[in-house]
Image (tube, grey):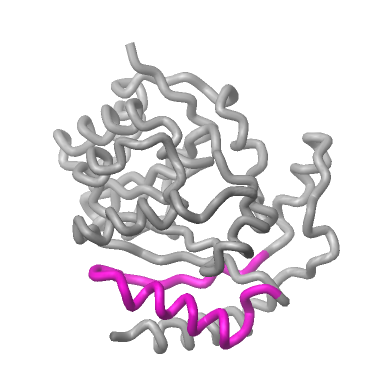
Amino acid sequence: MIKGNIHSIETMGLVDGPGIRVVVFFQGCALRCSFCHNPDTWNTKGGTEYTPEELVRKIERYKTYFKNSGGGVTFSGGEPLLQPEFLIEVLKLCKSRGIHTAIDTAGVGLGKYEEILELVDLILFDVKHYDPIEYEKITGRNIDESLKFLALANKMNKKMWIRHVMMPGVTDNEESINKLGEIIRSLNNVERIEVLPYHLLGVNKYEALGMKYKLELMPAMNKNKAKELEKLLIEVSKK
C-alpha cells in the first residue's frame, strides 16, 4: 500500500491558490534554499504517514468551503514532487471527487512529471533565480531539472502562477526583474505573478534544529519595495 509522509496540513488557506484552500505540506525537499523558512520539511523521513484515502478524507471535509469560494487543495512542502507515486494517487482521488488541485513546486522531484501534470489544475511555480550559477548558490542544486519541469508544464499548457522570493541585494534590481520577465514571457498560460519579500520568520527553526542560518546578515526585504518591483515584473512580463 502506498503511503506518503506529510509534514502538516493547513485549513482555510487564502494565499496558495484561488479561493479557500486546504494546504498539504509534503515532507522532504531536494533543495536547500538559503532563504527557506521551513527547514523542518527537508528530511524525507519525518512527518505523519497517510494513505491516499486517509489524506483525501481529511481534504474532503472542507468541500463546502471549496464550492462557495472556488477553492480546493494545494500540495506544497517541502516538495510534493519528491513523493510522485503517492501524489499521483491523491490527485486521482481528488479529481474523481471534483476537488480543484494545485501544486506549489520548484520543479525538482523524482520524475513522473507528465502523469502528475495531467492531473493538476494549477501550478504555483517557484522561480528561485534566473541565472544557473546564482540558482546553485541559493539552492545547492543544478537548475536543469527545474527548467525541464517548467518546459514540460508549458508544453502541456498548464495554468501557472509564478512566484519569486525577492532577496535584498540579490534580486531586488531592474536587471533581475527584466531577466525574470524574459522567462515569464516565454510561458503560455501564466495567470498571476507574485513577488514574495524575503523575511526572517523561520530563522528560529534553524537554531532549534541545531543548524546554521546562511543569511543571518541579510535584512528582511522592504515590503513596499517588493510590491513596486512586483508591479514592474508584471509589466515587463507582458507579451
Identify which residue is drawn at 36% across, 32% down.
84
Q: Tell me if I can see residue 13 in this picture.
A: yes
Let me know if residue 86 is in the magenta part. no
Image quadrant of residue 99? top left
Query: In the figure, is residue 56 to the left or right of 46?
Result: left
Image quadrant of residue 238? bottom left
Image quadrant holding the N terminus, namely top left
- The one of 24 and 148 positioned closer to us in this rendering: 148
Q: Is residue 45 above or below residue 122?
A: above
Query: In the figure, is residue 210 to the left or right of 89?
Result: right
What is the magenta range?
170-198
- The one of 204 and 144 positioned closer to us in this rendering: 144
Image quadrant holding the C terminus, namely bottom left
Let me know if residue 181 is in the magenta part. yes
Query: In the figure, is residue 40 to the left or right of 17?
Result: right
Q: Where's residue 82, x and y in %?
A: 45, 34
Identify which residue is drawn at 44% across, 49% down.
145
Q: Tell me if I can see residue 64 in this picture.
A: no
Label total for image: 0
Q: Is residue 163 above or below residue 232?
A: above
Image quadrant of residue 75? top left
Identify which residue is drawn at 62% across, 56% down.
136
